[in-house]
Amino acid sequence: MHSNAHGTIPVLYIVVPCYNEEDVLPESISRLSSVMRQLMKDRSIAKDSAILLVDDGSKDGTWALIRQYFHPNSFVRGLKLAHNAGHQNALFSGLMHAKDHADIAISIDADLQDDVNVIPEMIKKYDEGCDVVYGVRKKRTTDSFFKRFTAQGFYRLMKITGADIVYNHADFRLTSKRVLEQLSLYEERNLFLRGIIPMIGFQSTKVYYDRSERFAGESKYPLKKMLAFALDGITSLSVIPIRYITFIGLAMFFISLIASLYSFVRDMMGHTVIGWTSLMTSIWLIGGIQLICLGIIGEYIGKIYKEVKRRPKYHLEAILEKPSNG
Ligand code: UDP
Ligand code: MG
């Protein structure tokens, strides 16, 4: 007999954002389906549970594949976004769909770098009363040195700026319906789910797994996108960088006081021609610092600009969903 803190068998939606993933989808669907079958056999999840594939405006045959897999005896459902809205927005659209159809959602990347075998453990934690279960990587041995290094730097920077994010957790997580309902209240355009979910709160826990390599296709996160993602993450969660600018400004002001005192004394002593070196360096130094500061402020202004336009985060072009029998 199945009994949990909620008294019912939950409907699970596994939400998978897909951007040009035709190479990995068949394998991913088959792996996820076998996990689903096992969970249904154990009566851990309800019959209406599904794998929700969100096509994020792919240019390859991803949507054709999703349609092909959407048949009466498969778990597959689909959302098609009209345009490439980006990983976070695609995920958000899927979670909002799951909110209306399921009791719990688990988000996972299409390449299954995250271990699907911890999904039963996540559901067990939910049964025990957790509303959020974070999938956390044990170590990053399969990532390149460069990715490991930049990722670690990123988490460190996030911590300095005061953002509350879970170390080594990407977007592999379980969220309950009531967390998703709270998430739907966040209307910001600059979505950074990893930072928002801990802000929402509720009881949470972590499950650990080894991250493997992408088994087909290539990363959709080249360095340029990764840097943009890191910068977005920091500036969408914290205004501390702006505060640091003020501190730098104050420090510069004191240094310049000392410098002027120094040049005044030198002037009194009659050595007025020297100082070309210090002049040149300070011009460059101050110029550089000012540009950095302007850049950071610009970053926030850009964010504000995006927010005030209140544009929709994504456009749904098609939905493949089965009629509910509830
Ligand atoms: N993705 C997406 N839209 C994008 C870029 C990526 O939906 O514009 C999806 C992609 O299909 C995958 C997930 O986001 O399911 C993570 O991408 P990827 O595995 O390429 O990133 P990495 O693991 O290399 O950081
Ligand atoms: Mg990946």
Image (tube, rainbow, N blue to C red):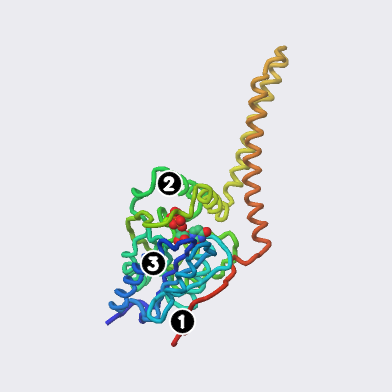
Q: CA distance from mark 3 to mark 2?
A: 27 Å
Q: Say whether residue 196 is visible.
A: no
At label 3, the amino acid type is Pro
Residue 255 versus residue 306: which sits nearer the camera? 306
Q: Which mark is residue 26?
A: 3
Q: CA distance from mark 3 to mark 1?
A: 20 Å
Residue 95 versus residue 76: which sits nearer the camera? 76
**Image-quadrant location for residue 74:** bottom left
x and y percent of residue 177 in the render? 46, 74
Element under disc 1? loop
Q: CA distance from mark 1 to mark 2?
A: 40 Å
Element under disc 3? helix
Residue 161 versus residue 155: which sits nearer the camera? 155
Q: Residues within 10 Å of mark 2 (few under 14, many from 20)?
A: some
Element under disc 2? helix
Quarter holding the C terminus is bottom left
Asked if residue 126 lies left or right of residue 318, the reply is: left
At label 2, the amino acid type is Lys
Quarter holding the N terminus is bottom left
